[in-house]
Amino acid sequence: MQLNHLDLSVPDVAAAAAFFLDGFGFCLLEQRGRGGMAILQGSGMVLVLTRDPQPVYPASFHIGFLQPTPEAVHAAHQHLLAIGIEVPAAPALMRGTLLFYCRVPGGILVEVSYRAKSG
């Protein structure tokens, strides 16, 4: 079975789309419903952003992007800072993983990480 897409509800579709386009290299495939939906592709997946004025997610909800090397994590961190995305803390080791967090406009937590292969 293969993941078809992930649909995230966000209050501002344009701002969330810009976050993924500029920050994570996604490409815009389509916009629908007068800015109420954007369909993006990147990181081997389709991401659908759907407008909801007050989306509700569980406290632990987040999405994660794995990087192939520690250097790629640091490069992603620097890239986000350079384009003006707020990143509260620099990459750090947590639970054996190098990672950092940031938020999509509207609040969804994003993790960027590298995990060394075990064994």
Image (spheres, rainbow, N blue to C red):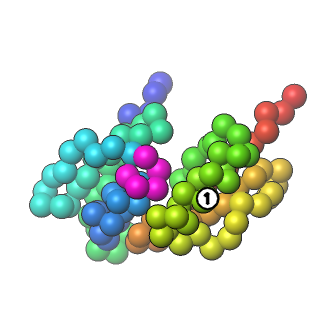
Q: Position of residue 106 (x, y in %)?
A: 40, 71
Residue 110 shown left or right of residue 14 in the figure: right
Which element carries disc 1, helix, strand or loop?
helix
Residue under the image location 28 percent in, 58 percent down: 50
Question: What span is in magenta?
Answer: 21-25
- Residue at image point 47% right, 50% down: 24
Residue 51 seen from this side: yes
Question: In the image, is 114 to the left or to the right of 28?
Answer: right
**Which residue shows up at 59% across the image and 69% down it?**
87
Q: Residues within 10 Å of mark 1 (few under 14, many from 20)?
A: many
Residue at image mark 1: 77
Tell whether position 15 is magenta.
Answer: no
At which x and y percent is residue 69? Answer: 71, 40
Q: Position of residue 60 (x, y in %)?
A: 60, 64
Which residue in the rendered view is the most extreme toward the right? Answer: 119
Question: Please, is residue 89 above or below residue 5 in the view?
Answer: below
